């Protein structure tokens, strides 16, 4: 089957992408690794001995970087809809984070331990329709914030990808209500045309009633 012009353009862009090429050279599973790498090196998010929850973890690029940084003594627990090739220093679960049974499995895997940082690179399957994609992204981010209320230790951090649009300001308000410092980040590996932004929330102080 002949490729469409748009798919040909995507393939050309993908395989000439400097971050994709760098990932191939340095042995990382995805170009997305460099988003976390940049933020971690600037903000010093990950340290040896930490327990990390990685939501939307496939194919494992963020977990790969995190596992290196929290070693020795740390561990990453990752979750995704898709299967993930095993990785030293990480435990991977497959399932839909929106389902209660999958959440319970994740909590059981964490064994009632509080995590130091939650990483969420979760994103919906995009339709190209902003009025559809943005609310789906906001919903996933809200779930990540609710998850923080269950497992994040006091003083812990949350890093979530979210699409900007209607509902974003309300989400940001909710995040600011329970963290001492909240910043918006756009790593260099995020494509310019992308509506994604990363919300970095530090110093978890718990829910306010």
Image: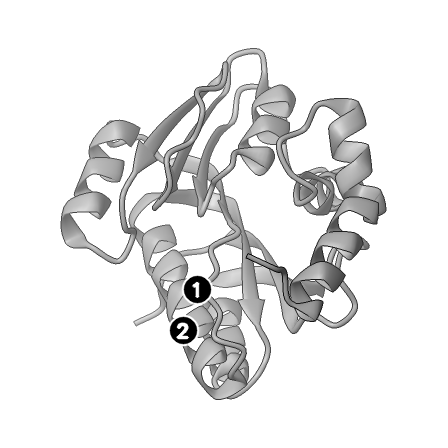
Give the vertical position of 131 relative to 81 (above or below): below
As helix, strand or loop, the secondary structure at mark 2 comes to helix
Classify mark 1: helix, strand or loop: loop
Depicted 174 relative to depicted 112: above or below: below
Up the image or down, 83 lies above or below 194; here it is above
Q: Which residue is at 44% across, 20% downward?
A: 86
The picture places residue 145, in percent across and down from the top left corner, at 40, 60
> Where on the picture, by quarter, is residue 128?
bottom right
Marked residue nearer the N-terminal end (2 or 1):
1
Query: Which residue bears the numbered disc 1?
Result: 124
Q: CA distance from mark 2 to mark 1?
A: 6 Å
Is 143 left or right of 126, judged from the image as shown?
A: left
Residue 208: x, y in percent? Answer: 36, 68
Q: Residue placed farthest to the left in the image?
A: 101
Q: Is residue 56 visible?
A: yes
Disc 2 marks which residue? 136
Residue in view at x 67 percent, y 43 percent: 36
Residue 166, placed above or below residue 113: below
Could you say which is closer to the camera, residue 81 or residue 170?
81
Q: Quadrant of the C terminus?
A: bottom left
Measured as percent of width and height from the top left, residue 137 is found at 46, 70
Camera sees residue 189: no
Q: Quadrant of the N terminus?
A: bottom right
């Amino acid at each position: 089957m002949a490729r469409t012009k748009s798919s040909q353009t995507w393939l050309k862009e993908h395989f000439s992408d400097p971050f994709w090429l760098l990932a191939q050279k340095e042995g990382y599973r995805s170009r997305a690794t460099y988003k976390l790498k940049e933020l971690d090196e600037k903000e010093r998010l990950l340290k040896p001995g930490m327990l990390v929850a990685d939501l939307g973890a496939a194919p494992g690029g963020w977990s790969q970087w995190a596992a290196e940084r929290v070693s020795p003594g740390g561990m990453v627990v990752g979750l995704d809809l898709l299967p993930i090739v095993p990785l030293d220093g990480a435990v991977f679960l497959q399932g839909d984070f929106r389902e209660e049974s999958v959440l319970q499995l994740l909590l059981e895997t964490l064994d009632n331990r509080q995590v130091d940082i939650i990483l969420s690179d979760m994103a919906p399957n995009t339709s190209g329709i902003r009025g559809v994609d943005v609310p789906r992204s906001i919903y996933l981010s809200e779930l990540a914030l609710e998850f923080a209320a269950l497992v994040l230790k006091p003083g812990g951090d949350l890093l979530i990808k979210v699409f900007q649009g209607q509902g974003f300001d309300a989400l940001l308000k909710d995040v600011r209500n329970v963290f001492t410092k909240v910043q918006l980040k756009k790593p260099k590996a995020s494509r310019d045309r992308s509506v994604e932004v990363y919300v970095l929330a530090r110093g978890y102080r718990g829910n306010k009633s």
